[in-house]
Image (tube, grey):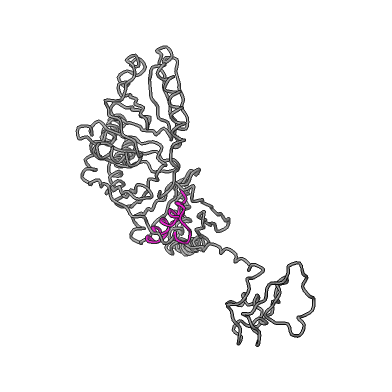
Amino acid sequence: MTPDDSAEYDPTLDAPGARGTAHPDPPDPHTPHPATPNPPGARGTARPATTHPHPTTDPSPDAPGARGTARPAPTHPHPTTPTQAPTERRLHPITPLRRAWAPIAVLVGWAVHDPDQAQQQLTRLTTTTLLIGLAVLIPAASLYGFLTWWYTHYAVTDTELRIRTGLLFRRTAHIRLERVQAIDVTQPLLARIAGVAKLKLDVIGTGKKDELAFLGAAEARALRAELLARAAGLAPETAHEVGEAPARQLLRVPPGVLAVALLLTGATWGTALAALVVPTLLWLATHNLWTVLATALPLLGAAGANSAGRFVGEYDWAVAESPDGLRIDHGLLDRTHETVPPGRVQTVRIVEPLLWRRRGWVRVELDVAGSSNSVLLPVAPRETAESLVARVLPGVSVPAPASLAGPPRRAGRCRPLWWRGYGLAVTDAVFAARYGLLRRSLALVPHAKVQSVRRTQGPWQRALRLADVHVDTGADKTVTARLRDADEAAHLLDAQAERSRTGRRDAPPDRWMT
């Protein structure tokens, strides 16, 4: 019994001589209570019904003779304990080193913006002035990094993630968990060496990701699991104990296959050829070395980004299946752990470059509402890719190329030669449109994800009785069935609007871990 409970305890019940087992019949409820104490001879066990609260000053419940099991029910409820505020946490202690570079980055940006002025200022500096400047700048940058880390907190509540930042101007971000699209864990190279990671959140209605940088690698994974569990509707007291959902690996892209696939990509050969031909022509025309270098270096950089850059970013690509979606891990230097959230995929594109067709390879790309996830599979055999698409879009089968209906032959007057790459197929589950002749791309849009349908006709299309049908998705992207017969397009417009309406009605709710 607590001290608060003793306020309801009446010591007279257990006074010496009181017989608590011989209670008489209860008094008539219509008979008023006497205002005076019981007259002599009255039995103390025949206590009237309680009409007034007991006094609040009672002896200790541990007094001799007190029987704590014989107290009546309290007449007034105890005061409710106020809800505890969420515990605020700080980022990893290594974070100030990242923030300390901000003042130095400002100076570097000024030097790049006005190189002539920066060069003039550097020539005026003496060794003593430079040392004094460094002696002031380094401690100031360190203090700035420490203070920004000190005033940055985050807390997890039952319904949201709160992030408080700002040294001079305070900012508090309230991220509601039901609005979260995806939660990714990324580790740049230096972060992997230091054992820390970034936690990035894709949220509906925001143009960029909110992030927590940096957290310990284990802490980032635990926080991600807790946020996903709370978003799935688990109780807050058990969400932090759930841990990361188990995953089963579906496939892994061998580095050798990825390297060959990148070498067989037209963009790689095109930029490499341009990097060789254009500087040569400029040298023959101008004989100016600086002009050649100013042109050749960007072209070589673009060629490297299309080959070496993609290889580094897509290295060791692995896809695993878990209750919270498909997990994607990739990266040679910067390791990224992404999640394709269930029910959020708006469009799936199966891309087939010209030089890949002989090997039967394809690339799978995604449009996810509010997310930057754009690649599901960099390269894989077509059968493997189609089985993976069936997991992203349950109940959807990829239409065979032979089942795609091409536009009428008169469409060649609008798009000579390229019209042969267009195709259309509408099944019970998806709206499928193909485009491209050298680099074919088949876009699959589930009917439930269609936001609007439009039909457009240009002057030349009206003359040829052709029309385009545009399907808009929730990812602000459009899939177009080009150069269809005008009557077919009119029928397709009405039929697709009805399919989209029934598809949204029958679609299951988009929830995590369900």
Q: Vertical placement of 9 versus 343: above or below? A: below
Say left or right for 79 vs 309: right
Q: Which residues are magenta?
A: 209-238
Residue 7 relative to residue 219: left or right? right
Horizontal and vertical percent for residue 386?
28, 37
Q: Quadrant of the N terminus?
A: bottom right
Q: Return the residue found at the far top.
A: 463
User: Depth check: 97 or 368 in front?
Assistant: 368
Judging depth in this view, the residue of 222 and 375 nearest the camera is: 222
Q: Position of residue 226 (x, y in %)?
A: 43, 57
Left or right of residue 395: residue 114: right
Q: Position of residue 176 (x, y in %)?
A: 51, 50
Furthest residue in direction right, as rendered: 35
Residue at figure coordinates x 61%, y 80% from the top left: 21
Prevailing SS of the magenta stretch: helix
Q: Nearer the viewer, residue 49 or 269?
A: 49
Seen at 46% across and 48% down, the residue is 180
Up the image or down, 102 lies above or below 114; here it is below
On the image, the x and y values in percent for residue 500 come to: 44, 31
- In this orientation, which residue lies closer to the viewer: 291 or 19? 19
Residue drawn at 26 percent across, 46 percent down: 251
